[in-house]
């Protein structure tokens, strides 16, 4: 029998906040978890003392289920092993591991042996079937999504194809979901919960630069483009961003356009950097990687993360609900 996402992860609301590197620090993750959904902190390239500092803030800031997001293809297998070991050693059992793309089978085994839950975002049916075979919550990302794209299918096509192959799996829809009404539609189409990225970029607790937040709040879906220009630090994967002077003219010189600080360490930001502008970034913010989903059309204001969770909680099932055809029809009617 299918369970809701809330039941699978011990939440009150079947909602995942994406662990967006740079944007989703411990503060956003804790605010989302404290509001009853699953917050997630972006681990991205953090290791050693910087990762430990973030994990300490994460576990001190909430006593509810929460996640840490890691990206296998960005760090490679050896660094990923170190990151996974650190998360397992330094956090309690209520912290789950969230992966963007497929980790090696040995990583699934290690996380399961530690008694932790795994969430994996995928973009193809094949990867979804593989992740489900390892007992993971499967997040199906469509090309409507902001950020890097794992496949070439639209969200609803991918959810439908996966639901057919995986009638029992816990399946979460991701990409282009900006309103509770849209969330209701994806539940009716077979998902057990939703993942939101862009909707949390504009949250008070997000670390996105203020001009990045206002650009997202003012944008429509048609202001976003799929490109491969922001490749420094994460090459070889297309991404959806707000259209910028750089996406319009990718032949500009690859010089430095800003400065930033990550966990206390200063960095220069080259043009074409994959890094998002955060509250610690200065320089030509409007030319940087402003990852943004087609969901932006439904997002108009900066609001506290708890308000985003409360708005979606109206349509998303809690832990008590067991999904049935009857329930799906009532979502569709909203
Ligand atoms: C600013 C931004 C940064 C992102 N960074 C990550 C990341 O570090 N790890 C990850 O798993 N997904 C990341 N994503 C992708 C999301 O997980 C998800 O696929 C996407 O946000 C869903 O579409 P939506 O933005 O329309 O809600 C990012 C998305 C955005 C908008």
Image (cartoon, helix red, strand yellow):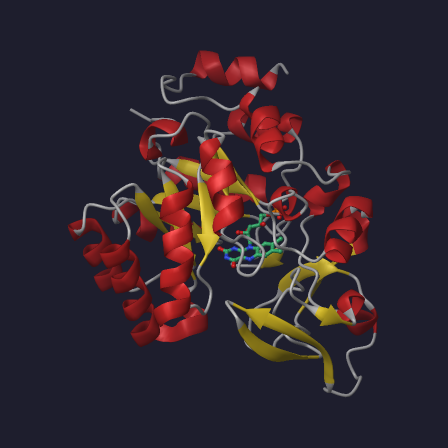
Q: From this view, report whether residue 199 is shown above or below residue 84.
A: above
Q: Is residue 116 visible?
A: yes
Q: Horizontal placement of 288 versus 309: left or right?
A: right
When asked about the image quadrant of residue 165, the answer is top left
Which one is in front, 202 or 179? Answer: 202
Q: Position of residue 189 (x, y in %)?
A: 53, 29
Which one is in front, 168 or 254? Answer: 254
Q: From this view, report whether residue 105 is shown above or below residue 66.
A: below
Q: Position of residue 43 (x, y in %)?
A: 44, 61
Q: Position of residue 54 (x, y in %)?
A: 42, 58
Which one is in front, 56 or 151? Answer: 56
Q: What residue is drawn where x is 66% and y is 37%? A: 178
Quarter of the image containing the C terminus? top right
Q: Horizontal placement of 264 versus 286: left or right?
A: left
Q: What residue is drawn where x is 33% and y is 68%? A: 80
Q: What residue is drawn where x is 48% and y is 45%? A: 29
When asked about the image quadrant of residue 319, the answer is top left
When asked about the image quadrant of residue 127, the answer is bottom left
Quarter of the image containing the N terminus? top left
Q: What residue is drawn where x is 65% and y is 25%? A: 181
């Amino acid at each position: 029998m299918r369970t809701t996402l809330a039941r699978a992860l011990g939440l009150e609301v079947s909602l995942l906040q994406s662990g967006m590197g740079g944007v989703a620090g411990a503060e956003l993750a804790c605010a989302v978890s404290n509001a009853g959904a699953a917050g997630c902190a972006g681990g991205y390239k953090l290791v050693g003392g910087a990762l430990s500092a973030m994990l300490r803030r994460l576990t001190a800031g909430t006593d509810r289920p929460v996640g840490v997001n890691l990206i296998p293809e960005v760090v490679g297998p050896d660094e990923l092993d170190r990151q996974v070991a650190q998360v397992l050693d330094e956090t309690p059992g209520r912290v789950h591991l969230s992966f963007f793309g497929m980790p090696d089978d040995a990583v699934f085994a290690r996380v399961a042996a530690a008694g932790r839950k795994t969430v994996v975002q995928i973009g193809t049916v094949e990867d979804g079937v593989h992740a489900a075979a390892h007992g993971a919550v499967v997040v199906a990302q469509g090309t409507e999504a902001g950020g890097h794209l794992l496949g070439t299918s639209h969200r609803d096509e991918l959810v439908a194809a996966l639901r057919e192959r995986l009638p029992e799996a816990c399946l979460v829809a991701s990409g282009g979901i900006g309103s509770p009404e849209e969330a209701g539609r994806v539940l009716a189409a077979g998902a057990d919960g939703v993942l939101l990225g862009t909707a949390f970029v504009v949250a008070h607790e997000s670390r996105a630069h203020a001009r990045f937040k206002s650009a997202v709040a003012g944008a429509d879906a048609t202001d976003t483009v799929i490109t491969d220009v922001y490749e420094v630090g994460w090459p070889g994967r297309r991404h959806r961003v707000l259209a910028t002077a750089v996406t319009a003219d990718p032949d500009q010189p690859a010089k430095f356009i800003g400065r930033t600080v990550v966990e206390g360490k200063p960095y220069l930001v080259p043009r074409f950097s994959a890094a998002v502008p955060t509250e610690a970034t200065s320089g030509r913010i409007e030319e940087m990687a402003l990852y943004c989903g087609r969901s932006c059309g439904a997002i108009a204001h900066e609001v506290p993360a708890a308000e985003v969770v409360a708005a979606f909680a109206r349509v998303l099932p809690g832990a008590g609900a067991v999904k049935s055809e009857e329930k799906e029809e009532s979502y569709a009617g909203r």
